[in-house]
Image (spheres, grey):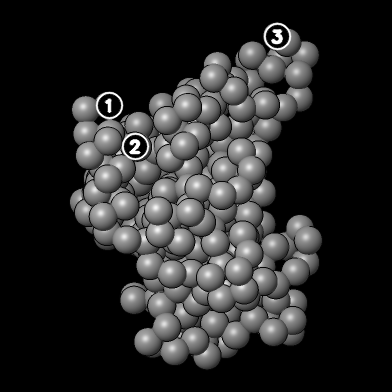
């Protein structure tokens, strides 16, 4: 087994969302329930970073301890590569509103279970698996021109905001990805305490995404070179810390292996 595939299999089950920082030889863990926003220009490595997170979730999905959902408003081109590893992938705006409504219903059911059992938090298990929702190109949920599109986008944003606000205790973890760090493009970014900046266009964009404190601590995603996709900075707003990282390329054959394994799931 080659070195990169061994990296994919490391890490504690209690840290399902993680990726390996090749440059510093360490795992970077996204704390469960701490929603994350990943942002970077085209070619900065967003899809590859999502691939790291998704591939590392595969053992939990296989064990029934995680259910993976996706929204990919590029027609499912990116997330559709993983086949049945995803329980469901929404590739259109109508499919997105339907999926988010279904997840809100799941949230209601879990909250009812918490009330009935006098619990405050779901501990993910086979009965209540961790639910991970990956939304690629989250900016497509805003900026509609016609009335029908605007209404559908608003419906989706309201449902997504509810999941972001209330989902942590119920075992939901949401990862948003976009090319645009502006709040008007992705208004839900403020619900994400974990911010990840890949290559950005300017210092102003870095401050929009990561905040002034992160830039003052050394985060400089606007200085990342065009020829170094996968490099970036993670800012944990809860812990007030910046982590620089660089990830390698997830091999295409690894993604195809997963798609083939779950083709008939």
Q: Earlier in the sequence, mark 2 or mark 1?
A: 2
**Label 1 or label 3, whichever comes before in sequence order:** 3
For residue 85, which numbered disc appears in the image?
A: 2
Label 1 and label 3: CA atoms lie apart by: 33 Å
Q: Quadrant of the C terminus?
A: top left
Find numbered disc 2 in the image and state the secondary structure of the residue it sits on: helix
Which is more foreground, mark 2 or mark 3? 2
Which element type, helix, strand or loop, lies under badge 3? helix
- How many C-alpha atoms fall within 10 Å of the one at disc 2: few (<14), some, or many (≥20)? many
Q: Is residue 73 visible?
A: no
Q: Position of residue 170 (x, y in %)?
A: 63, 29
Residue behind mark 1: 265
Report the Cα–Cα distance between label 2 and label 1: 8 Å
Picture coordinates of residue 230, whole percent (x, y): 45, 73
Determine whether, in the image, residue 115 is placed left or right of residue 72. right
Q: Secondary structure at mark 1?
A: loop
Instruction: Please determine whether, in this image, residue 204 is positioned above or below residue 155.
Output: below
Residue name at image x 63 percent, y 15 percent = 112
Q: In front: 232, or 188?
A: 232
**Compared with residue 170, is residue 18 higher up or lower down, i.e. above or below?**
below
Residue at x 67% of width, y 25% of height: 122
Residue at mark 3: 116
Q: Is residue 148 above or below residue 234?
A: above
Do callouts 1 and 3 mark residues in contact (Cβ within 8 Å)? no
Counting labels gives 3
Quarter of the image holding residue 180? bottom left
- In terms of sequence position, does the residue under pointer 2 or pointer 3 come before the other? 2
Circles 2 and 1: CB distance less than 8 Å? yes
Q: Position of residue 208 (x, y in %)?
A: 59, 75
- Residue shown at 56% from the left, 49% from the top: 10
């Amino acid at each position: 087994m080659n070195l990169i595939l061994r990296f994919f299999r490391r890490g504690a089950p209690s840290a399902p969302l993680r990726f390996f920082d090749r440059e510093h030889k360490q795992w970077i863990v996204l704390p469960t329930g701490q929603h994350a926003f990943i942002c970077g220009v085209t070619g900065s490595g967003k899809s590859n970073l999502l691939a790291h997170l998704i591939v590392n979730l595969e053992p939990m999905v296989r064990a029934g301890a995680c259910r993976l959902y996706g929204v990919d408003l590029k027609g499912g081109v990116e997330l559709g590569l993983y086949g049945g590893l995803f329980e469901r992938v929404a590739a259109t705006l109508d499919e997105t509103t339907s999926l988010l409504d279904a997840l809100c219903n799941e949230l209601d059911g879990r909250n009812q279970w918490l009330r009935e059992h006098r619990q405050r938090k779901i501990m993910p298990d086979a009965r209540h698996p961790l639910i991970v929702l990956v939304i690629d190109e989250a900016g497509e949920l805003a900026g509609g021109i016609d009335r029908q599109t605007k209404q559908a986008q608003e419906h989706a944003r309201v449902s997504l905001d509810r999941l972001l606000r209330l989902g942590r205790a119920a075992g939901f973890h949401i990862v948003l990805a976009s090319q645009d760090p502006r709040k008007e493009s992705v208004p839900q970014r403020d619900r994400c305490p974990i911010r990840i900046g890949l290559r950005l266009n300017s210092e102003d964009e870095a401050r929009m995404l990561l905040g002034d404190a992160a830039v003052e601590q050394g985060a400089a995603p606007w200085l990342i070179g065009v020829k170094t996709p996968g490099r970036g900075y993670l800012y944990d707003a809860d812990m007030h810390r910046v982590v620089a990282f660089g990830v390698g390329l997830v091999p295409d054959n690894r993604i195809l292996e997963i798609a083939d394994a779950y083709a008939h799931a």
